[in-house]
Image (spheres, rainbow, N blue to C red):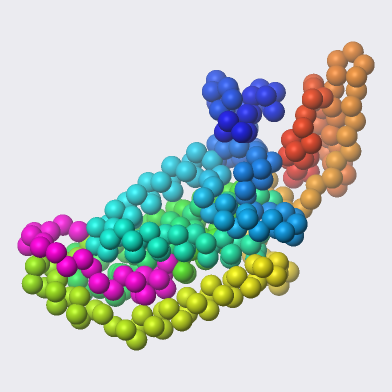
Amino acid sequence: MAVNNCGENSHGECALGALGRFSFQPLPENPLLGPSASTLDAVGALRRTLLTEHQTWRLFTAPWLHAGIFHLLINLVSVVYLGIHLEQEFGPLRSGMIYTLSALVGSLVSATFVQDSPQVGSSAALFGLLGAMLAVLIRYWRHFNDKCAALLFIFSIFTINFALGLLPYIDNFSSIGGFTSGFLLGFVSLYKPHCRDLPTNKVGLFDYGVQSSIKLKQKLDKPVLRIVALLLFGLVFSGCLVTALWRINLNQYCSWCHFLNCIPSKRWSCNDMTSSCEILQSVEHNAELTLTCMANGKFMVFPFTNISPARVGDLCTLICS
């Protein structure tokens, strides 16, 4: 938010303006209490026009960005809860591998569907952990402490975060890619819970004691299932990588897919087209800046003229939406 500096760039029209430099863009611009579209572009968000300019480094930065405070908090709570359970049973190495690879695959999927608006995909890593948890639930069905609670938890976290992705700037396609990769990697790597001295009243994902934990490791280690899941993951990863590097836009073959990413509303914009505005500056008496959208004829007058080109683009998109 220090980079965004809403107080200066938006001339005081900010949410929670008392925070000064760390205040947020007006809610019609970003309903998630976050920065402007131009700031997201500057820090590494994905955008179709930027990817076509060979800025492939954005594939590695977008998965670690959040669209706003609401996005950050919901992701953080979900990741901490999921991560604790998976790390306790399978260790930090395997859990961290799933988290990282899911974020990368999610970014590749996002690149094939992203349109001309900034998108961030930090939810891909979270959905990767969700997919891994579902794989664990399927594989260890008989050994779960509370199957219904586990299913309800996975469904609730999935629904809440996917619904959040229907707001601007959060990429649900990266979440879908992350969930798919996490599900497959869960079968590949999460096949042996830690074998350690466990009390008989252990509280966790599984219901097993000291002796049964050894049998569980031997029983659930199915190499064929792991090999099939690994091959499927390899196909998904390579297919997404080729599609992203060739900059193929799958939206051309799916006219309704963009509704999975953002639902239009009067309260925010899902504009995915490059907006064009006529700019008129008045220096007589009080300096004013008038922006007129070339697409719909709407205009807005601002009582200042010292606006950066990037900020003009943000305002133009808002007017044209």
Q: Residue at x 63, y 62 (%)?
A: 111
Q: Residue at x 89, y 38 (%)?
A: 278
Direction from residue 157 to residue 89 in the image, left or right: left
Direction from residue 126 to residue 316 in the image, left or right: right
The x, y position of residue 228, in whole percent, is 41, 83
Viewer-proximal residue among 65 and 37: 65
Direction from residue 40 to residue 90 in the image, left or right: left
Viewer-proximal residue among 239 and 207: 239
The quadrant in which residue 49 appears is bottom right
Dominant secondary structure (helix, strand or loop) of the stretch shown in magenta = loop
Direction from residue 151 to residue 104 in the image, left or right: right
The x, y position of residue 83, in whole percent, is 33, 55
Q: Residue at x 34, y 49 (%)?
A: 80
The x, y position of residue 28, in whole percent, is 64, 37
Viewer-proximal residue among 170 and 120: 120
Quadrant of the snapshot with the C terminus: top right
Residue 223 in view: yes
Viewer-proximal residue among 9 and 30: 9
Above or below, 319 against 16 in this view is: below
Q: Residue at x 51, y 50 (%)?
A: 64
Above or below, 141 against 100 in this view is: below
Q: Which stretch is magenta?
A: 182-204
